[in-house]
Amino acid sequence: MSQFAEIKEWYLSEFKLFENSLNGESAAPIHKIRKEAISNFSNLDFPNTKDEEWKYTNIAPLLKYNFKPAPQKSDVKPEHVNKFLFNELEHSLLVFVNGHFNQELSKIKDLPAGVIAGSISDSIKEKSPVVEKHFGKYADYKNQIFTALSTAYTRDGAFIYVPGGKIVDDAIHILFLTTRAEENILTQPRNLFVAGKNSQVTIIEHYASLDENIYFTNAVTEIFADENAVVDHVKLQEESKKAFHIARMEIDQEKNSNFSSHAISLGGDISRNDFNSRFNDEGSECMMNGLFLTDGTQLFDVHTLIDHAKPHCNSHEHYKGILDDKSRGVFNGKVIVRQDAQKTNAFQENNNIILSDDALINTKPQLEIFADDVKCSHGATIGQLDEEAMFYLKSRGIGEETSKSILIHAFASDVIKSIKVDAIKNYVEKILSDRFDG
Amino acid sequence: MLLEIKNLHANIEGKEILKGIDLKVKAGEVHAIMGPNGSGKSTLAQVLAGKEEYEITKGEVTFNGKNLLELSPEDRAREGMFLAFQYPIEIPGVSNTNLLKTALNEIRKYNGQEELDTMEFLTQIKAKMKLVELDQTLLSRAVNEGFSGGEKKRNEIFQMAVLEPKLGILDETDSGLDIDALRIVANGVNKLKSKENATIVVTHYQRLLNYIVPDFVHVLYKGKIVKSGGKELALELEEKGYDWIKEESNAVVEN
């Protein structure tokens, strides 16, 4: 019997309640996938630190709680949502409260004909052929226990579909908000973004909490970028500092597609991200950048995989970490360049700043190169704030705290500058200022 | 008296570098501190600016009527001390403008003056840029990043011009500069000179002193000022080198 058998039983028994609550929805074709996923879930074990992929991230604390899906009712008002919005940005807004789509709080702007931005639950009910074609295709629910759990419990999440040739000018901001609740809430946003040929879209996936509660977000996002599509993705993770955040993002890239992602992470007691991108054809680009800030006893873990399966693709990955107090960070960046993938350009860099004596980062670049005509580079640094630079600033009359803040802003600046949407740039700068400016 | 150093001793990693420095600087004066390599010139400059690696084991320093050694590096700057670094630090991601505006406003705040807004600040610095013939594009660039050696040194003097210190300490500002850059830097320093402020020029070479004419020249050797004189002492050093000073000073020690 495995170590976490009891909690597994809990999720299995809760599934029956969940299934009953689905009502007519279980008639939809994807319910077969749910059933398959729960059966996979029952066969899989929760990972422990003996698993290479989870070596530095012990999820035992997460498995101590009996998390439960939240009821649909909520008392969230627009004024609660306001502080998480980008006021200077024209955008569509999808709000999910405790995992459920909230029509009243959402605001969809005029979208080009055929573009869908809304609740995946609705599209599942309507038996959307796009959902049926792509759902569950990219995120592995056979071997990954948390993805199996998400897939089994698929209820709601964001669904964005941009048909071929359509350009969505204004960003789509998806806000996942968790609120106060009697019980420890489980939310499992299940997102699917499909960008058709020659289309373009900017999507902001934003996780936030109104209270500093213990809850569990288990998010899965599948992204399909068809030929020549441009998808710009931002993930802002501002969960409660007591919450658990497990997330998987799978990107499938067709010929000449361009995907860029910026993951900004601040919240969560334990957060684990698996971001994987695959090039299925030539000429594509993938950017995966990130910035994480940890303090207290937070643990942030990001595992990325960029799979250069085909020639003439470029990938660019740059993660920066700022760690304080007794917090810990894990960066594991894997790049596979397969034998076919000649003329690959792959760049990877991870830089970390440790602000205290007790913070810790484990960083591991992992390059597996099977082609011979490629350009690949990687680097990892761990350091403290540059003392020479600190002295230089102080010698100009700038105080200790301000000097520190200036250098932290400077450290993060290249990742922040690469964010394409100005409103997000400013939002992230403000997060840094709020945290570090005296 | 603007600056008064009495019997200053300083160590780094247990090794004594300054072995009893005495120096008095009044407002309106220019002092040159010369000496062979390793004599402690740069250490003295950095100790005055408040570099934490140095341990002060003995002595007193009064600056502007305050006990300098009790002040943090930032408070020394706010009291009017400025060190032009021998090796200016590159700070990627921080623009020159941001550094200067923050610095100037922190200094103003400390001295009970109102902070400048961006417009006022930009007007002020434009005039100062001309002093050191600094290209305006350097303002928006990261501090010293990718600057040539000459640009870095000019940037130091430019910062000094903006912050308007009571005491400017130029630590080997002339080293590595070609004669044109040297003239520009010296010209900037001369224009900033007034009855209210003073300058300490730390240098290995007499060359700079042709352009910034000192009132006093001190020779530092083995952590002590072994000889002081007027500007003619610099010329003598240029002509005869440092050996005669070393011999004189070693003879004194042996006696």
Image (spheres, helix red, strand yellow):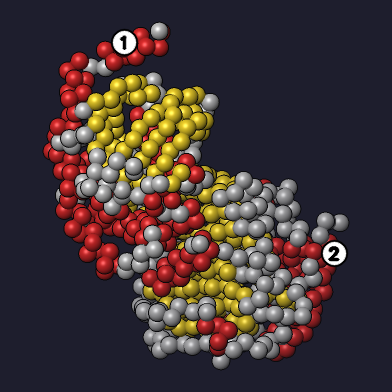
Looking at this view, is A22 or A118 the one in front? A118
**Snapshot quadrant of residue A247:** bottom right
Q: Is residue A195 depicted above or below A73 in this figure? A: above
Looking at this view, is A196 or A360 the one in front? A360
Q: Position of residue A245 (x, y in %)?
A: 64, 66
Q: Residues within 10 Å of mark 1 (few under 14, many from 20)?
A: few
- A206 vs B50, left or right, is right
- B229 vs A209, left or right, is left
Residue type for callout 2: Glu
Q: Position of residue A222 (x, y in %)?
A: 55, 69
Looking at this view, is A356 or A62 the one in front? A356
Q: Could you confirm whether marks 1 and 2 are on the same chain? A: no
Residue type for callout 1: Glu
User: Which of the numbered marks, if any, corresponds to residue A6?
Assistant: 2
Q: Is residue B178 depicted above or below A114 in this figure? A: above
How far apart in space, not on screen, are marks 1 and 2 (Cα)?
86 Å
Residue drawn where x is 38% and y is 75% of the image: A199
Residue furthest out toward the bottom: A104
Residue furthest out toward the front: B1
Q: Residues within 10 Å of mark 2 (few under 14, many from 20)?
A: some
- Image quarter (top left, top right, bottom left or bottom right) of the N terminus of chain A: bottom right
Q: Chain of mark 1?
A: B
Q: Is residue A25 depicted above or below B109 in this figure? A: below
* Front tag of 1 and 2: 1
- B140 vs B89, left or right, is left
User: Which of the numbered marks, if any, corresponds to residue A227?
Assistant: none
Residue drawn where x is 66% and y is 80% of the image: A179
Residue annotated with mark 1:
B247
